[in-house]
Image (cartoon, helix red, strand yellow):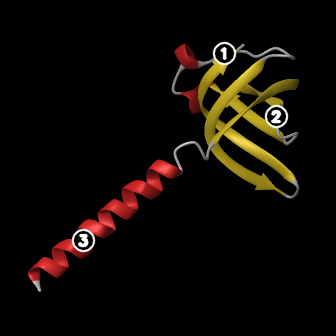
């Protein structure tokens, strides 16, 4: 009975680890900046992804963890972003927590 509990616990832990590893890039988007709207403590960049999806990316110093991580995009930049993805009606949004790359 002890071995059954140990095996069950091990399977549960392995399932959790595998599911976390599979979701690693779920909150990452990549695409081209098509417009920028300045805000109070940052800006919102409209991103068109390779799959032709449009995301409104909120970029602020606070969400990025400080001014050393903050970057200002230009229209036409190719970006890769990580953060919290959410929907408002038909619009897709991402609150950016990390700027992975800007080209």
Q: Residue at the spot x=18%, y=81% of the render?
A: 4
Image x and y of residue 38, in percent: 82, 24
Disc 2 crowd, CA 10 A, few/some/many (<14, 14-19, 20+)? few
Q: Secondary structure at mark 2?
A: loop
Q: Nearer the viewer, residue 101 or 84?
A: 101
Q: Is residue 53 left or right of residue 63?
A: right
Q: Are marks 2 and 1 in contact (CB under 8 Å)?
A: no
Number of numbered labels in the structure image:
3
Looking at the picture, does residue 87 appear above or below residue 57? below
Q: Does label 3 or label 1 sit earlier along the sequence? A: 3
Q: Residue at the spot x=75%, y=35% of the render?
A: 57
Q: Residue at the spot x=61%, y=18% of the render?
A: 70
Q: Which mark is residue 50?
A: 2
Q: Does label 2 or label 3 sit earlier along the sequence? A: 3
Residue at the spot of label 1: 71
Disc 3 crowd, CA 10 A, few/some/many (<14, 14-19, 20+)? few
Determine the CA span between mark 2 and mark 1.
22 Å
Is residue 38 visible in the rendered structure shown here?
Answer: no
Image x and y of residue 85, in percent: 68, 47
Q: Is residue 12 left or right of residue 43?
A: left
Q: Which mark is residue 9?
A: 3
């Amino acid at each position: 009975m002890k071995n059954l509990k140990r095996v069950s616990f091990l399977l549960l832990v392995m399932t959790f680890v595998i599911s976390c590893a599979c979701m690693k890039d779920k909150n990452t988007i990549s695409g081209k900046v098509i417009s920028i709207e300045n805000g109070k403590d940052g800006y919102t960049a409209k991103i068109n992804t390779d799959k032709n999806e449009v995301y409104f990316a909120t970029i602020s110093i606070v969400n990025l963890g400080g001014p050393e991580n903050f970057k200002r995009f230009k229209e036409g930049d190719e970006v890769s972003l990580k953060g919290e993805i959410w929907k408002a009606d038909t619009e897709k949004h991402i609150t950016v927590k990390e700027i992975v790359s800007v080209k």
